[in-house]
Image (cartoon, grey):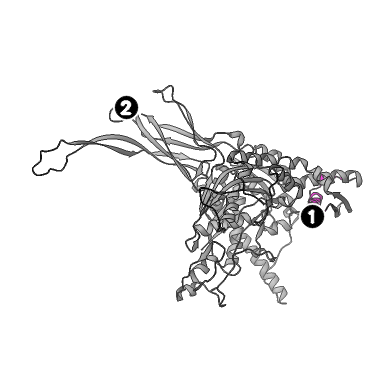
Amino acid sequence: MAVVGIDFGSLHSKVPYSDTLCPTFIANFLPVVSRSVWPGIAVSTLSPTKSQIAKHRAYPSHSSDFCRLYPRHERSNQSLLLSIRSLVAFGPKQRAIGEPAKTQETSNFRNTIGGLKRLLGRTVSDPDVQNIEKTFTNVTLIDVNGTVGVEVKHLGQTQKFSTTQLVGAYLGKLRDIVSNELKVGVTDIVLAVPVWYTDIQRRAIIDAASVAGLNILRLINDTTATALGYGITKSDLPEAENPKHVIFIDVGHSSLSTAVVAFSKGQLTVKATAFDTNVGGRYIDRALVNHFAEQFKTKYKIDVLSNPKATFRLAAGCDKVKKILSANTEAPLNVESIMNDIDASSKMTREEYETLIAGVLDRIPAPLAQVLQDSGLTLEQVDAVELVGGCTRIPAVRAKIQTIFPGMALSTTLNQDEAIARGATFASAMLSPVFRVRDFAIHDIQPYPIKVEWEKAPEDPDEDTELVVFPKGNGIPSTKVLTFYRNKPFEIQANYAEPSGLPGGINPWIAKFTAKSIGPDPKGDLSCVKVKARLNLHGLLSFEAAYTEEIEERAETPMAVDGEPEAAPKKKKVVKKTDVPFVWGSTSLDKTIVESLREQEAEMHAADKLVVDTEVRFYTARRRGGKSDVRFRLVGPQERP
């Protein structure tokens, strides 16, 4: 089995993979490896046994001792692509996921869902869903079991799916693509997610991975993954007393994330993070689409925005304009047969372009200034500023970033599109038992403060009823022990301490803890109850233990020594711990529900595969000039999307 690192993106996801074989297979079966697969990663030098070679028929016949793990760009076959579109589409016969969904998006727009990363873990009433996400999709968004879902037409029937199901189907597609390329099963992954993901969103993506039959070894923040890919390969890092401070700025398709990271020998420490969830390329594209749509109302007497297919055509043209203006001062726009058999054309200068997107650009400085302030550093203490994300290629974006860091060079030493995926892959190699990775510690932080609340004890009317247990910037993983004095069962509720800082209208509720079977101690006083709360590697809060503590005095008789008087017994205080039964709940789906969704996904996956295999048999027979036993019926009007 292989351990794979994935960058889960809102426009597309990226998965680095081997050029020829699964990294796990290479690590176990190449007899001699004289070079590292990646800087910082060396492969084990174990020789294969006959049984191992028989099990893995892909054992290489060539004599090369080096196999790159670095991603390729030249391939066009979807199963070998590095980038997989974050789209799930439903049709009359099967689902289309990834690139196939993109090819039919224009004709099947009412059943094609994008922005999965943005919808996961949210509710339909969330202001971001109502005011923003609905403007970027043509699918009907509905409530499905308390979370946002979709209503689509699938197999000729109207069906409802939750975002967790959609993401599960999408991750399953990624699993199949990578497994097909590596010729080995994939069950364990490291997933890079936005730093602004909350507890409910992180639990939702873990549930989605379970639906796809995947086990997430670690959820790593995207900025931390970028930092890992940057630091693990460097051999000239300073000592911990004088670390190198680097600011990473990621301006992607739909959000901006930034982090200040301190690097020293063998480790990285995230000092601060900040973000704006509504800054990115799609908002620039929307500004261009609205501008030209308004222009075409006067020029061609057509309303492009009233026609979804015409809007798709115009959006594709605007994307080209955006890219051309990143390197040129003027760009043409030509859209053939945009609607009503009209060929639309226009042009735009860079000056007009930058004026048009000023509203997006003006949101960039705030999170950059915030992360610098939270880190406690001055500009003079910052050693480098690294840019990643596609939008950092836009000159106006770079100029806006430069205003926060005057006089400093903005570096692009990292691959702007692959930096996060590369870091996630390094993290997966660190967790894989078959790779020998350079020792490199990751010290990440919690972006939101977490507090616990409880009811006041009648015996102590002056007792506080809340406490910030994990403040903003608290390291992860982290464990805290809370002490309560009670003589009866009680409850604790965990919430985010600053709901206004959460993205959109995310519910600040995290978890609820209930301690049972608590009574007075043997002396009739209040029992001292300890509750252990933990913030794990994924950034998730859990309650792991509850116990009472009772101090007992025990007499110890000292050892008798010949010829000396007998010493008096000594009293020793001993802490006696007794486990307290407790229950706690979070926003994670119940195991029975996850299992039901997994079975449902497995059935749909098998049905999709059957359709694909049948079509392959049919067209293979046609190409060979023979007759096929496969017959297709015509699709009726009621089954058309």
Q: Is residue 307 magenta?
A: yes
How many labels were placed on the picture?
A: 2
Q: Secondary structure at mark 2?
A: loop
The local crowd at label 1, few if under 14, some if 14 to 19, many if 20 or more residues have their Cα within 10 Å, is: few
Q: Secondary structure at mark 1?
A: loop
Q: Decide which of 138, 291 is in the foreground and name it.
A: 291
Q: Is residue 330 visible?
A: yes
- Image: 87 above or below 406: below
Residue displayed at 36% across by 34% down: 517
- Kindly report the distance in space between the C-alpha atoms of the residues bearing marks 1 and 2: 76 Å
Q: Decide which of 163, 380 is in the foreground and name it.
A: 380
Q: Is residue 141 magenta?
A: no
Quick check: 459 left or right of 510?
A: left
Q: Is residue 159 visible?
A: no
Residue displayed at 69% across by 70% down: 618
Q: Main secondary structure of the magenta part?
A: helix
Question: Residue lying furthest left in this view?
Answer: 563
What is the magenta range?
A: 301-328
Question: Which of the numbered marks, if any, corresponds to residue 327?
Answer: 1
Question: Which of the numbered marks, if any, corresponds to residue 302?
Answer: none
In primary-sequence order, the first of circles 1 and 2 is 1
Query: x and y percent of residue 487 in the render?
Result: 36, 29
- Image: 479 above or below 455: below
The local crowd at label 2, few if under 14, some if 14 to 19, many if 20 or more residues have their Cα within 10 Å, is: few
Quick check: 279 left or right of 213?
A: right
Q: Disc 2 marks which residue?
A: 525
- Image: 93 above or below 272: below
Query: x and y percent of residue 552 in the render?
Result: 26, 35
